[in-house]
Image: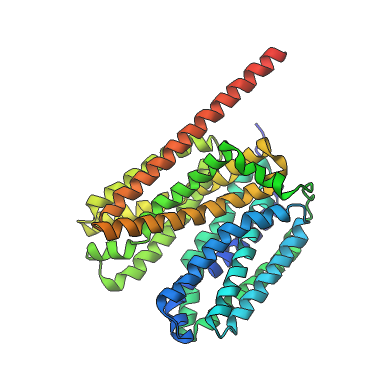
Amino acid sequence: MNTIELTKQHWLLILTLALLTFVLGTSEFVIVGILTEISSSLHISNSEAGTLVSAFAITFAVATPIVMSATSHFPKRKWMLFLIGSFIILNALCVIASSYILLLGLRMLTAIVTGVLISLAMMVASETIPVAKRSLAISFVFGGFTLANVAGVPIGTVIADWYNWNATFVLTALLGLLAFTASFFILPNMENQARSSIRDQFSLLTHPRILMAFFIPSLGFGATYVVFTYLVPILNEMAAPSQSISLILFGYGFISIFSNILAGKIASRNAIGRLRFVFLIQAIVLISLYWTTNDLLLGLINIGLMSLMAILLTTSTQLYLIDLAGIYQPKATGLAASLMPVASNVGIAFGSALGGLVYHQGSLANVTWVGGLVAVAASVLTFVSYRLDQKERDTGRREKLRVS
């Protein structure tokens, strides 16, 4: 059997897209590490500064599908280069932003650019890489976000500590310039998608199978963030030394790199079938934290397993949504490509809010089993999706036999 190998050009494209997602991820996530500096500099409360995070996530989730639908027929290479250029300008303007309102507006515009660029990067990887290697390519592209959390955010935070928060946006603007240069030389010219109305695009979201596939990653991410949002208080309850918490969080991010690698392997064959059991294992890992927090070593091992399970769903659900769109509304693959990033933001917001509700209504330890129950819900949805896929394949086979 012939094995399909990726060419040098394929690898350059994959690495360029991974660099782009690293830059976008650093810009999105670094704000958390510099919130106190921003609030102090702009003379606002920490809660007001926190709206920079929530406003980004809400704008990302709402605007990305709309813009992707409206611009689905745009030439991808030119459109991506324009957006990366816009990203550089917006981050450069953040350097000189002198008011909260101006910074908030710039961050919301950056959220729109970020959401569309992420979706386009996924589309390019999906459409230009051989089908047999799509899962590998998508996992590398998602790996840029993982690396942003492990390296980009800490570097941006250190720069803010050394200089000021404005300097962090100098870093993201320069990283954007690096991504623009690489993209200019590497991004291929691609066929434009046929023009279709926004109404036709959004008709994709009326299909129950698409909605079900959307809520799988939403619940998967939500399960993790019910617990992860309160990981530092959990570490405190475990009597982890305060000076080691930053190192533990770095370790959590480092382990997620391996989670990203495994995500590509899971997506390589029978992805949705495998995800059914991935979510069940995730549920066990989250619920077991209820007991292992009584022992520091066991608790840290459990948290490491939590990180390993956290993003195993990404590649599989991204490709699943694109493939389902190809079946039900081929003109809406651009919209479909945007749904996984949107679902992840919805899941993060949902998980954080649910975790906060549980935490304030009872014991901190309760967030662990609630997170586990959300993972079980994700597994149930995946079981149903998998069963429907099997039924449709069986119906298709019978139809072919009948015709022949």
Residue 378 lies in what quarter of the image? top left
| Coloration mode | rainbow
Q: Position of residue 178 (x, y in %)?
A: 66, 71
- With respect to residue 19, does 384 lie above or below? above
Q: Identify which residue is drawn at 75% across, 64% down.
A: 185
Tell me the quarter of the image containing the C terminus.
top right
Q: Can the viewer see residue 300 in this picture?
A: no
- With respect to residue 345, does 389 lie above or below? above
Outermost residue toward the front?
199
- With respect to residue 372, does 20 lie above or below? below
- Total labels: the figure holds 0
Q: Identify which residue is drawn at 65% across, 49% down.
A: 335
- With respect to residue 231, does 317 lie above or below? above
On the rendered structure, is 222 left or right of 236? right
Q: Nearer the viewer, residue 152 or 283?
A: 283
Q: Position of residue 339 (x, y in %)?
A: 58, 50
Tell me the quarter of the image containing the N terminus.
top right
On the rendered structure, is 398 left or right of 37? right
On the rendered structure, is 42 left or right of 125? left
Q: Nearer the viewer, residue 265 or 4?
A: 265
Q: Identify which residue is drawn at 46% across, 37% down.
A: 381
Q: Nearer the viewer, residue 29 or 150?
A: 29
Q: Position of residue 326 (x, y in %)?
A: 68, 39
Q: Identify which residue is drawn at 30% across, 54% down.
A: 367
On the rendered structure, is 392 left or right of 400? left
Q: Can the viewer see residue 200 in this picture?
A: yes
